[in-house]
Amino acid sequence: MKPQYFRLYLPLAYICFFIVGCSTQKVSVSLLSEKANTRSDQRPINIGFYDKQANKTFVTWMGASSSAVVKEYDHRTKTWSVDKVVGNSPFVDKHNYPGMLKGKDGKIYIFYGCHNSTLKMTVSPSPLSIDGEWKDSFIDIAEKASYPAPIITQKGTFYVFYRETRQNNKYSDDRPYRFVKSTDSGKNWTKQMAIDPYPRKTDNMMEIYNGKVSYQPAHGNQKGKIHLAWTIAGEKLGKHAHATYGRNVYYAYLDPSNDHLYNINDVDLGETIDTEEMDKYCMVLDTGIPEKGHLAGLQVSVHYKDNGWPLIYFDNQLNGGPGSATWNGKSWVFATIQSPGNEIRDLRDPRELEKIGANSFRVYIPNENKIKTYITNDGGLKWKLETAIQVGAKVDRVEVIENATKDIKLFITEGGDGEINIAKRNVFYGKVTSGYKKPYQINKIK
């Protein structure tokens, strides 16, 4: 047998492992809390983390009356705590969901409680524990906020990105994108306008919508970046309305060293991207003005490859369903994410996007009573159906826990109709039963 033909005789599973190091991740799902969650409009943000020092996993979700609920799992005793309310929203709203970060002081920070209103923050009294009375307060300068996406940098700086319902034009379709920033663990905050699409000459789509915001730590010759991708919504010319139509996909990154925004070609766009710069420098996909609906969905998410280039994940209505866009150094390359046959029709609303390697990613897409996972090992050029996670209940949201262990990796909420002030939905967690890999850490690369 000639050496160059030897690979043809290897078992397929071995070839897969040898070439890309792949092994199918399989997950079992267990009930975390019964009738503890309410209907929400949750984005794929940070909702929990595992800490090796404490050997605990912490999670948060929105409970009855839009409260911020936390729970911790002690991996030594293999026990969950009881559900604990640590923050109370000023009003009931499906948008008031929480996001969780571990501060540089080890305390747990939760950002929540806003829809066109002032952002709230609640903080644990002790590091790496949910015990005691939390400090629940408003971040006063983050007014008229919605969809908070919290990020913490290597230096421990908080960024909380949010859409602002500004309405300078006296209509509901003026909603730019801002962030607030704290360098002292939430004691003091500053704010900055990031993306301002008002006014537009071609349409009245001046509302920013996005999903996952990803922080890339500095490593090697790569500087730190906060990756942002978004779409715009509103109305057509001559009319004003909230989120009636949606078009286009855009990308930029924020450099935490100077808080300037840059496009994919590293053009410095200053502290704020205006509508002309957005269309000229940040366009990923021009969908045209739709006849109806939103041509890119309302949850445009982004992650990054090790070389600093982004992978964008969105509902590409021009191609019939969820897809991705990635940069090849010269242009944007698009791919469709789908399963065999016509099942793409069931895969409507993209959820979680997980980085699992230098150029490898996994997406999680709810599909009735299961979650379908798809993987790419070439930075989004091709996607393959990996598995279907059986949940046993209609799935609404699925999130990957930061730095997760195999015992508790996924956080899952039940879907379906229901009141927003009464907790009627179950909360689940996912355990990896085979194919587990430790969370990919780009900052360990020399």
Image (cartoon, rainbow, N blue to C red):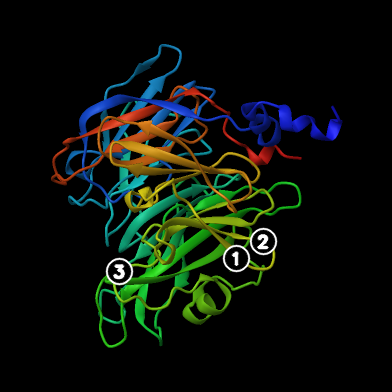
> Local crowd at mark 3 within 10 Å, few (<14), some, or many (≥20)?
some
| Mark 1 vs mark 2, CA separation in Å | 6 Å
- Residue 202, given in percent of the width and then of the height, sits at 40, 86
- In terms of depth relative to the viewer, which is nearer, 408 or 224? 408
Q: Residues within 10 Å of mark 2 (few under 14, many from 20)?
A: few
Residue at the image position 52 percent from the left and 33 percent from the top: 403
Q: Are marks 3 and 1 in contact (CB under 8 Å)?
A: no
What secondary structure is found at the residue carrying circle 1? strand
Q: Which residue is mark 1?
A: 332
Q: Let me know if residue 321 appears in the view.
A: yes
Q: Residues within 10 Å of mark 1 (few under 14, many from 20)?
A: some
Label count reads 3
Q: Of residues 69 and 398, which is closer to you in this image?
A: 398
**Are circles 1 and 2 on residues that touch, CB within 8 Å?**
yes
Q: Amino acid at mark 2?
A: Asn
Q: Which mark is residue 293?
A: 3
Q: Earlier in the sequence, mark 3 or mark 1?
A: 3
Q: Residue at x 25, y 84 (%)?
A: 239
Kind of residue indicated by mark 3? Gly
Q: CA distance from mark 3 to mark 1?
A: 24 Å
CB under 8 Å between discs 3 and 2:
no
Q: Which residue is mark 2?
A: 328
Q: Is residue 11 above or below residue 171?
A: above
Classify the position of the N terminus by image quarter: top right
- The residue positioned 45% from the left and 13% from the top of the image is 76
Rounded to the nearest angstrom, the CA distance separating label 3 from label 2 is 30 Å
Q: Which residue occupies the foreground of this view, 429 or 130?
A: 429
- Residue 24 percent across, percent down from the top left: 53, 30
Q: Quadrant of the C terminus?
A: top right
Nearer the N terminus, badge 3 or badge 2?
A: 3
